[in-house]
Amino acid sequence: MDELDTLISDWLNLPDVAERLDVEVSRVRRLIEEGQMISVRRGDPVVRMVPALMLTDGAITPHLGGTITVLRDGGFDDEEVLAWLFTEDESLPGRPIDQLRRGQRGEVRRRALALAL
């Protein structure tokens, strides 16, 4: 988890995610199971947490679910997906998560597909 701690500073527990999305916590769990966003266990006590940047304006960041699917299909585990999304990529420029938040799906998805091959 140490790498994720350096890459991601703002985390939300599932009730906070539910509040921001204006849904029940059970719906948040289902969204995670469906691969629309990723949670990891962390903290003390250990609870499921979601990076805050996976939410944009009260919704899940656009194109996030599809990008997660591409990377998972390529063999990435959830921590590797998070590390990739939150690591600077000079060729984008910036982090893939920031590009997705700006609606720039194309280049992010191309890079994800190339990694997944």
Image (cartoon, rainbow, N blue to C red):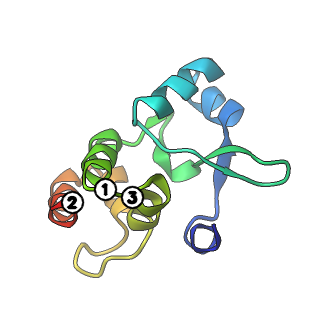
Looking at numbered disc 3 in the image, what kind of residue is underneath it? Ile
Residue of label 2? 116
Q: Return the residue at label 3.
A: 97
Vertical arrangement, residue 99 with respect to residue 48, above or below: below
Marks 1 and 2 sit apart, C-alpha to C-alpha, by 7 Å
Q: Are marks 1 and 2 in contact (CB under 8 Å)?
A: yes
Q: Secondary structure at mark 3?
A: helix
x, y percentage for residue 10? Answer: 64, 57
3 to 20, vertically: above or below:
below
> Which residue occupies the extreme bottom position in the image?
90
- Left or right: where does residue 41 sit relative to residue 109? right
Which is nearer the N-term, disc 1 or disc 2?
1
Check residue 75 in the rendering and tell me which mark sits there, or answer none. 1
In the image, 88 versus 37, the foreground residue is 37
**Which of the 4 image quarters holds residue 104?**
bottom left
Q: Quadrant of the N terminus?
A: bottom right
What amino acid does circle 2 point to? Ala
Q: Is residue 89 above or below residue 82?
A: below
Secondary structure beneath dot 2 equals helix
Is the residue 60 above or below the residue 91 in the image? above
Other residues around mark 2 within 10 Å, as few (<14) / some (14–19) / many (≥20): some
Taking 37 as reference, is 74 left or right? Answer: left
The amino acid sitting under disc 1 is Gly
- Where is residue 8 shown, x and y percent of the image? 58, 64
Q: Nearer the viewer, mark 1 or mark 2?
A: 1
Q: Position of residue 34 (x, y in %)?
A: 40, 29
